[in-house]
Image: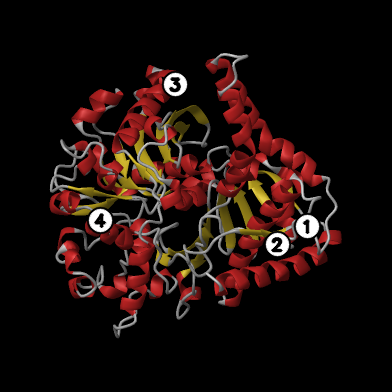
């Protein structure tokens, strides 16, 4: 391999975008920069009570430019001149309505403040009704078009969101030419695309969220969608037939973006993919080892050889797609709709009175009050974790179900709600927090159980992401509940690191992503083993969790 070649990995998360510059020879991080989305931070275009979460494309465009330029400034001109490729991962399914040129409608006059013209974030559940209609509709066809997405279509995904937006907004409906995932749009933007039909769609987003399958010859036929709702007529012809794995180039950096970033036009732009899929590669996934990207939600990735998966269709997960994680293998995705979000909900609920009282205080000024409130907020979860870790527990302790944002897997149902039971006058904040953490671990175990039950054995666990690295309390409980060790990857930014590995492969620095993963991977720096004194009690409480969950599901 030639010396001094660098690649950029861009990771679009829920709250911010992070870019890193990496030495392609060894994966060493040269520079990193984070750009929090300013409009998102203000809570614009979102209505949590209505499960509406939208993000403005300007947050993404500004973040892309500023985070990469900051990295290049930190790295210096010598490094910038040797950048060979950029690859991008994003949250998903996070699609947007675009016009014929591929421009998101919110970037056009008249749509700037219209949430329906913006990216519909992964956790937006406004399309629950449409998802239910898709599931019922699919049963009328001889071909099971849901077979590769676990048999249940989710309101978090591509078609349900499109149908909801078309129904909800006539102005957007008339202007919408096509519908594009965030991970596919950013490479199109960087390569200077001018026509929506030219967007290179990744097999990752297409297979897991859009019902694309090689066995169908692409997307389901237009008649499938038109008979569901005439508003969908013709969309398949304006979408895509071919898809690409993330080790392939989407094109080269356009002259406009080369000038904006200070890079050369021969920089390769890789095909995009979802954050957890690239994160699994950044975290050095192995066959049959469940790679758990743990942040606001979880995405659980597993890869298996094609031959092993012949004739197997895992029910109730987020899909199994050839080449979606590692080209040449079957990628299987599952996850939880709320993980870190569940902890953040509890933290915010506890903090609300403090924030309100500080904001109304006549003793300190508003800036000081805001600073104190922010500092207090940051300390709540670490303090709760320290206290909760010391608590004794038994089969009568507080018990929770983790469906605070619905259930992603197994068996998607976004109408479900969370619950906390066994409360008494002695139920204080650390005890309730402990129950919430335990519930998220039980939700994770339900996913492992489903894989095992469906003949896809989970042989190991890999922990990735902020929660995995920052909370020994949660990771130890995860190991105890799973009764399996869990290895924690060394990298602080496995998703961005995975994007960098794919960039190196798309640029031809490595012949395949496995070679990039071996050369650029940073290894593991922690491992949690189950405490056998707690395993039996957790197994009993896990059954109680299922009993409580069944009750909730039967009574919604």
Lower sequence index among marks 2 and 4: 4
Q: Pick whichever, 534 or 67, lies toward us.
A: 534
Q: Is residue 458 visible?
A: no
The residue depicted at 34 percent of the width and 23 percent of the height is 81
Rendered position, 239 above or below 389: below
Q: Position of residue 196 (x, y in %)?
A: 17, 49
Provide the residue designation for mark 4: 168
Task: Estimate the spatial distance between the alpha carbons at disc 3 and disc 4, rounded to whole Å.
Answer: 46 Å
Task: Estimate the spatial distance between the alpha carbons at disc 2 and disc 4, rounded to whole Å.
Answer: 43 Å
Question: What secondary structure is found at the residue carrying circle 1?
Answer: loop
Lower sequence index among marks 1 and 2: 2
Task: Estimate the spatial distance between the alpha carbons at disc 3 and disc 2, rounded to whole Å.
Answer: 42 Å
Provide the residue designation for mark 2: 482
Lower sequence index among marks 3 and 2: 3
Mark 2–mark 4 CB contact (< 8 Å): no
Q: Position of residue 320 (x, y in %)?
A: 44, 67
Provide the residue designation for mark 1: 530
Mark 1–mark 2 CB contact (< 8 Å): yes
Rendered position, 555 above or below 405: below
Mark 3–mark 4 CB contact (< 8 Å): no
Provide the residue designation for mark 3: 75
């Amino acid at each position: 391999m030639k010396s001094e070649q660098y690649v950029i990995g861009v990771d679009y998360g829920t709250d911010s975008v992070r870019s890193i510059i990496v030495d392609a020879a060894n994966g060493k991080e040269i520079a990193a920069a984070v750009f929090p989305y300013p409009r998102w931070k203000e809570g614009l275009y979102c209505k949590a009570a209505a499960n509406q979460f939208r993000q403005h494309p300007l947050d993404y465009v500004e973040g892309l430019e500023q985070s990469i330029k900051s990295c290049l400034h930190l790295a210096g001109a010598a490094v910038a001149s040797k950048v060979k490729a950029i690859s991008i991962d994003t949250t998903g399914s996070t699609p947007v309505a675009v016009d014929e040129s591929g421009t998101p409608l919110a970037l056009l006059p008249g749509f700037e403040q219209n949430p329906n013209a913006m990216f519909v974030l992964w956790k937006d559940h406004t399309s629950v009704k449409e998802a239910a209609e898709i599931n019922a509709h699919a049963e009328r066809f001889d071909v099971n078009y849901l077979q590769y997405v676990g048999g249940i279509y989710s309101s978090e995904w591509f078609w349900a969101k499109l149908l909801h937006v078309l129904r909800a907004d006539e102005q957007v409906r008339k202007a919408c030419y096509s519908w594009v995932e965030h991970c596919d749009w950013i490479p199109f933007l960087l390569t200077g695309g001018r026509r929506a039909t030219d967007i290179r769609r990744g097999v990752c987003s297409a297979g897991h969220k859009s019902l694309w399958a090689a066995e169908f010859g692409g997307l389901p036929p237009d008649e499938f969608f038109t008979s569901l709702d005439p508003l969908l007529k013709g969309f398949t012809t304006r979408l895509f037939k071919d898809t690409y794995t993330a080790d392939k180039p989407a094109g080269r950096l356009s002259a406009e973006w080369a000038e904006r970033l200070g890079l050369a036009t021969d920089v390769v732009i890789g095909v995009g993919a979802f954050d957890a899929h690239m994160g699994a590669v950044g975290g050095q996934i192995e066959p049959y080892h469940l790679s758990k990207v743990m942040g606001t939600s979880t995405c659980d990735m597993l890869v298996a050889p094609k031959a092993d998966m012949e004739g197997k269709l895992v029910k109730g997960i987020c899909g199994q797609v050839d080449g979606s994680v590692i080209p040449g293998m079957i990628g299987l995705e599952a996850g939880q709709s709320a993980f870190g979000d569940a902890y953040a909900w509890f933290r915010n609920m506890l903090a609300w009175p403090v924030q309100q009282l500080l904001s109304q205080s006549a003793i300190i000024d508003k800036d000081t009050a805001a600073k104190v409130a922010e500092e207090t907020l940051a300390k709540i979860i670490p303090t709760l974790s320290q206290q909760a870790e010391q608590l004794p527990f038994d089969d009568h302790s507080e018990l929770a179900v983790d469906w605070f944002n619905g259930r992603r897997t197994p068996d998607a149902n976004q109408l479900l709600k969370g619950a906390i039971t066994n409360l008494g006058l002695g139920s204080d904040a650390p005890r309730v927090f402990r129950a919430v953490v335990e519930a998220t671990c039980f939700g994770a175990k339900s996913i492992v159980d489903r894989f095992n039950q469906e003949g896809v054995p989970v042989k190991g666990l890999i922990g990735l992401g902020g929660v995995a690295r920052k909370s020994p309390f949660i990771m130890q409980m995860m190991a105890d509940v799973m009764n399996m060790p869990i290895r924690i990857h060394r990298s602080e930014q496995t998703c961005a690191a995975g994007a960098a590995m794919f960039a190196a492969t798309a640029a031809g620095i490595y012949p395949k992503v496995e070679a990039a993963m071996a050369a650029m991977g940073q290894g593991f720096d922690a491992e949690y083993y189950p405490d056998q004194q707690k395993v039996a009690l957790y197994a009993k409480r896990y059954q109680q969790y299922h009993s409580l969950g069944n009750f909730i599901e039967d009574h919604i």
